Image: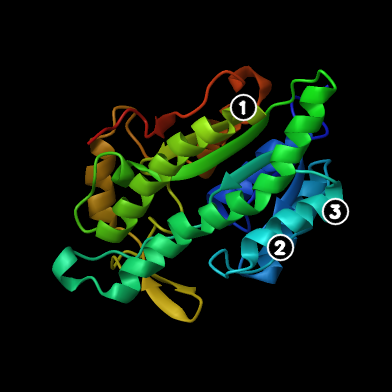
Amino acid sequence: MKKLDGKVALISGSGRGIGREIALKLAREGARIVVNDLDPALANETVDAVKAAGSTAVACVGSVTEADFGTRFIGSAIDTFGGVDIIVNNAGYTWDNVIQKMTDEQWYAMIDVHMTAPFRILRAAADFIRQKAKEEAAAGQETFRKVVNISSLAGVGGNAGQMGYGAAKAGVNGMTRVLAKEWGRFKVNVNSVAFGLIRTRLTEAPASGGGAIKVEGREIKVGVNPDVLKTMEAGIPLGRGGTPEEAAGAVYLFCIPESNYISGQVVVCSGGFMF
């Protein structure tokens, strides 16, 4: 028996990077996956990779910031697989600036993708989770479900130039602690994983230090200058940035039965680095 046999896991932003690795990690342990990405091609690539790993998957394509996305996402899991067991709120990106240069558009983009989107997804799951928990309790069953919200060191200790991102990620941690108390009686473990430096497209950059991604028609500058990356890594006790696979491992710990008595926690995955 694999640890997640029969479970249904939804991972937002799982077309590439950390989200894709989370999807594959959970799939290898038997979970059926609802994949999400803005790009249909990337979402379908992850679906194929999940199938190649021996599990099943379905894609729910679209932006997590769309008003109806939460309902569609949860509906995809229920309609396709008949339930919801694990929700990983992973989708997001950085759009940085110091406060005097940060526009309202930048601020709300960070709040919308990192806070409002997870809120809507979890709200959309509430009726199903409450009803199933009541049915299971009446039958004398204790079935645990899992929510893992992705946060950041910027939301734990702050980071200059990330007012919107840091505030949103701190809000995610607050949301985690509130929901752990609201949903504890339904046997739902709610935790956050706060990442430090993980080597993804959001941190990797050309030698010139410039890079960009396109998000809903916006071109967002991303990447960290290689020289700055080296300095950052020198301050990490383990001596390097983490890989997406290692990041997925931290999330996996909160999805397995061994974490059934852990809830309302924020665990930092940063190679030992703290602000």
Q: Dot 1 lies on which element?
A: helix
Measured as percent of width and height from the top left, residue 75 is found at 76, 57
Q: Give the left or right position of residue 119, taking residue 35 as reference.
A: left
Which residue in the structure is indicated by mark 1? 185
Mark 1 crowd level (few <14, some 14–19, many ≥20, 10 Å Cα): few
For the residues carrying marks 3 and 1, which lies nearer the camera in this image? 1
Q: Earlier in the sequence, mark 3 or mark 2?
A: 2
Tell me, yes or no, if residue 19 can be seen here.
yes
Q: Nearer the viewer, residue 10 or 206?
A: 10
Q: Which label belongs to residue 250? A: none
* Residues packed near mark 2 inside 10 Å, few (<14), some (14 to 19) or many (20 plus): some
Quadrant into which the N terminus falls: top right
Residue occupying the point 75% across, 60% down: 59
How far is disc 3 from disc 2 in space, using C-alphas? 12 Å
| Amino acid at dot 1 | Arg
**Residue at 36% of width from left, 65% of height from top?**
222
The numbered disc on residue 80 is 3
Q: Can you tell which mark lies on residue 72?
A: 2
